[in-house]
Image: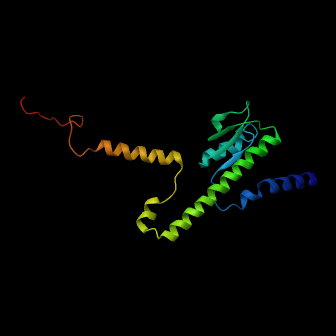
Amino acid sequence: MESQLLREQKKIFRNLNGIRTMGNLPGAMVVVDVNREKNALFEARNLGIPTICLIDTDGDPDLADIPIPGNDDSMRSIDVIVRELCAAIAEGKAKRAQEAQERAEGGANEEEAASQGRRRSSRSQFRAEEDATAADTDSPAEPTAEAGVATETPGN
């Protein structure tokens, strides 16, 4: 019984120790098998973590924020997808560092830096733009008949 409990403790420590020492939430989560990792996907959805999933024909694409169709059983297809994702991430980080360096060398003013503010996901950015557009149309500069103000035209 003791050896069984020690084995279970080692397994839990091996699988969950990285989560315990994590300082903040991850920016995204990559999942290879949707059916096997449903609990992780539900937890990510509750925490608002975007998920990128390699989905086979037996997987549910509604569980993923960004579904990638492919064979999640083949090591070769998993290797190709993960390698391309890693290359894209490295390219994005390098581009971001280059832009930050150019901005620092160009002497960007404080207003420009403040206007950029916090980066948003494409969904929330779209919603923010949509809300701003709706606010602009809800408060027009001149009163109209749609706003409940009667307008008269000369000659009537």
Question: Image check: 77 left or right of 8?
Answer: left
x, y (%) of residue 148? Answer: 21, 36
Q: Residue at x 76, y 44 (%)?
A: 80
Q: Where on the picture, by quarter, is residue 112?
A: bottom left
Question: Image check: 144 left or right of 130?
Answer: left
Q: Nearer the viewer, residue 85 or 43?
A: 85
Q: Residue at x 52, y 70 (%)?
A: 104
Q: Where on the picture, by quarter, is residue 33?
A: top right
Q: Nearer the viewer, residue 2 or 104?
A: 104
Q: Residue at x 66, y 62 (%)?
A: 23
Colour scheme of the rendered structure:
rainbow
Name, please, the residue furthest toward the left.
Answer: 155
Q: In which quadrant of the rendered image does the C terminus lie?
A: top left
Name, please, the residue furthest toward the top.
Answer: 156
x, y (%) of residue 6? Answer: 89, 56
Q: Residue at x 74, y 49 (%)?
A: 83
Total marks placed: 0
Q: Nearer the viewer, residue 36 or 118?
A: 118
x, y (%) of residue 66? Answer: 63, 41
Question: Image check: 133 left or right of 96?
Answer: left
Residue 114's place in the image compared with 88, above or below, is below
Q: Where on the picture, by quarter, is residue 136?
A: top left
